[in-house]
Image (cartoon, rainbow, N blue to C red):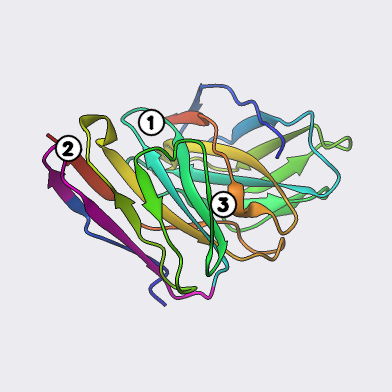
Amino acid sequence: NAGVTQTPKFQVLKTGQSMTLQCAQDMNHEYMSWYRQDPGMGLRLIHYSVGAGITDQGEVPNGYNVSRSTTEDFPLRLLSAAPSQTSVYFCASSSSRASGYGYTFGSGTRLTVV
Amino acid sequence: DAKTTQPPSMDCAEGRAANLPCNHSTISGNEYVYWYRQIHSQGPQYIIHGLKNNETNEMASLIITEDRKSSTLILPHATLRDTAVYYCIVRVENGGFKTIFGAGTRLFVKA
């Protein structure tokens, strides 16, 4: 199993550009989330989804959109990139079963907005 | 979900046990305690979780107090590769979708 796959691994954007960060998981997990991590800081929740067709906002949702058309995929869209969105973005998935092993994280997308 | 409190940083000598504390005084009866770690700039990695009994796996042990208001993650023989940020999180049953990570504890394992 591949687990959680994020693409691209690195991206440089100009201010005002838009782009989509891809996230796919092959574990049939119901829950998926997007986090951002600024240098030297902890993880902050951007958006999350409890299943296909259902999404909700996390701690820092402004400037980002998400959709969940399938169980496997949870793309994150930056509408108009700003330098403040320079960060490492992690996608994670989890089973709804409490006895599951918590979140499985992807390897991250390192985004620089210039 | 209950909030957790962890010390910002800790040191540990290589080969010794690393004991990382976590306070979760407002934990509810159906909330589990989860531990993750993040090595350098990699994605966080699951370590262990528990409800009220002590748990052990190949990576670590988790000791939860009887009142469940605090827990300790134990790395029995810390190595330099265990240098990482360790996150303690509490999560409700079937509700782990909105998991909030705190700042964690930065563990430095020294030779």
Q: Is residue B89 magenta?
A: no
Nearer to the camera, A36 or B56: A36
Task: Name which of mark 1 and mark 3 comes first in the sequence.
Answer: 3
| Distance Cα–Cα, label 3 vs label 2 | 33 Å
**Residue B3 place in picture, x, y as percent:** 68, 31
Kindly state the secondary structure of the residue where label 1 is placed.
loop
Task: Give percent across and percent down for residue A94.
Answer: 56, 62
Chain to which mark 1 belongs? B
Q: What residue lies at 82% left-to-right and 36% top-to-bottom?
A: B65
Q: Are marks 2 and 1 on the same chain?
A: no
Question: Vertically, is B103 above or below A64?
Answer: above
Disc 2, SS? strand
Marks 2 and 1 sit apart, C-alpha to C-alpha, by 39 Å
Q: Is residue A5 above or below residue B91?
A: below
Task: Give residue A41's position: percent from left, percent from top.
Answer: 40, 29
Q: Which residue is mark 3?
A: B47
Q: Which residue is at the front of the view, B44 or B30?
A: B30
Quadrant housing the N terminus of chain A: bottom left
Magenta span of residues = A11-28
Is residue A20 rendered magenta in the image?
A: yes
Residues A94 and B46: in front is A94
Which kind of residue does numbered mark 2 sit on?
Val
Residue at image mark 2: A113
On the image, the x and y values in percent for residue B99 come to 59, 45
Indicate which disc residue B111 carries. 1
Mark 1 and mark 3: Cα distance apart in space = 23 Å
**Residue name at image x 74 percent, y 51 percent:** B50
Could you tell me if the residues under marks 3 and 2 are in contact, i.e. CB atoms within 8 Å?
Answer: no
Question: Which of the image's four quarters has the C terminus of chain A?
Answer: top left
